Image (cartoon, rainbow, N blue to C red):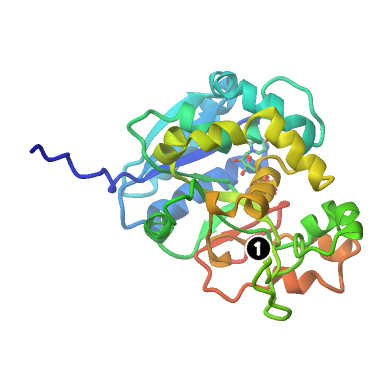
């Protein structure tokens, strides 16, 4: 009998995307603030994996040096070239872009929106799990809490995501919903529970600003390789008359409804979005039912360029 080495559960891999950045982009200070924030609040030793283009890499290096010089902690990091990453997930991007991208078309820009779905090919195989974070986040509590969610994953879960906190999917699904009485795109509520329905309490969809990725499970999943094929994606989008523009999170939202075993739902405090755009664009009456989050906030997400209150 030989004993296998213990699983490397102590690896804390954080992936960030930092591309198309210029001297003046807001993304520069968002990146700076997030690194500083995570470094201050984390009780575990993290490894950062940063996807960059050539000019952004130079700016990232400067920001990292600046954060390190003002703190007494080191930052372990590695850069990955966005064009190489895009190449590695070309087939996935080609399948998903026509359904989930606003302006299909240029260079590697499409690939950026779908990195999380192909990260299992980009990350070294020694990484068994990783989190992919937007740069417009602020941690109110230890990032260790986020990694601890992996241990709550149901055995079939490949990804962990928190709910989308706006009615965007009610909007996207309005044609389908005009013909079908469905809880898809409806807010989570406790009325009208019928146990035979898959999401009797309403399903708002997912937001991909914070993504937990069970890399080894995805690499081993026969089902996943079928799910990202054109036939599956085309039939899913046809069924729901779904045409989105939010990239990977549109796809996770469809999976969450149709293949709920693949996704672990994190509570809304792990991705407390702040964007209120939909409140002022036709959904004032229901907005708050979607936006409310009764869980304690671990991560604030200043999406659609919303200022994060500190
Ligand atoms: N991003 C990037 N370059 C860009 C725009 C976005 O690298 O020009 C990355 C960055 O990591 C950012 C993420 O993509 O956090 C998602 O964009 P953003 O957070 O602005 O979208 P939102 O959350 O507002 O939908
Ligand atoms: Mn964001």
Q: Nearer the viewer, residue 252 or 181?
A: 181
Quadrant (top left, top right, bottom left, bottom right) of the N terminus:
top left
- x, y (%) of residue 56? 58, 28
Q: Nearer the viewer, residue 75 or 206?
A: 206
Residue 77 vs residue 251: left or right? left
SS of the residue under disc 1: loop
Q: Nearer the viewer, residue 49 or 309?
A: 49
Displayed quadrant of residue 235: top right
On the question of residue 245 being in view, the answer is: no
- x, y (%) of residue 8? 26, 43
Q: Which residue is mark 1?
A: 198
Displayed quadrant of residue 215: top left
Residue 189 vs residue 81: left or right? right
Give me the residue at 78% from left, 36% from top: 99
- x, y (%) of residue 306? 70, 57
Give me the residue at 69% from left, 75% from top: 194
């Amino acid at each position: 009998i030989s004993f296998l080495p213990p699983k490397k559960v102590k690896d804390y891999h954080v992936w960030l995307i930092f591309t198309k950045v210029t001297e003046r982009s807001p993304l520069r200070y968002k990146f700076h603030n997030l690194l500083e924030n995570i470094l201050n609040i984390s009780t575990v030793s993290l490894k950062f994996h940063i996807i960059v283009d050539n000019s952004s890499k130079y700016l990232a290096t400067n920001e990292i040096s600046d954060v390190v010089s003002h703190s007494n902690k080191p930052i372990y990091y590695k850069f990955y070239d966005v064009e190489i990453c895009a190449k590695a997930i070309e087939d996935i991007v080609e399948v998903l872009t026509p359904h989930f991208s606003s302006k299909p078309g240029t260079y590697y820009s499409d690939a950026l929106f779908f990195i999380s779905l192909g990260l299992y090919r980009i990350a070294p195989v020694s990484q068994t799990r990783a989190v992919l974070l937007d740069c417009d986040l602020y941690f109110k509590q230890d990032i260790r809490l986020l990694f601890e969610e992996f241990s709550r994953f149901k055995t079939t879960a490949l990804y962990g995501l928190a709910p989308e906190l706006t009615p965007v999917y009610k909007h996207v699904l309005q044609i389908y919903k005009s013909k079908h009485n469905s809880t898809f795109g409806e807010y989570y509520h406790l009325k009208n529970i019928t146990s035979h329905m898959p999401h009797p309490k309403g399903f708002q969809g997912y937001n991909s600003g914070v993504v937990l990725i069970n890399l080894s499970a995805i690499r081993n999943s026969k089902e996943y390789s079928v799910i990202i094929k054109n036939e599956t994606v085309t039939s899913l989008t046809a069924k729901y008359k779904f045409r989105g523009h939010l990239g990977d999170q549109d796809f996770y939202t469809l999976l969450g409804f149709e293949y709920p075993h693949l996704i672990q739902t994190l509570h809304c405090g792990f991705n407390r979005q702040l964007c209120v755009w939909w409140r002022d664009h036709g959904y004032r009456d229901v907005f708050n039912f979607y936006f409310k989050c009764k869980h304690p906030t671990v991560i604030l997400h200043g999406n659609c360029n919303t200022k994060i209150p500190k």
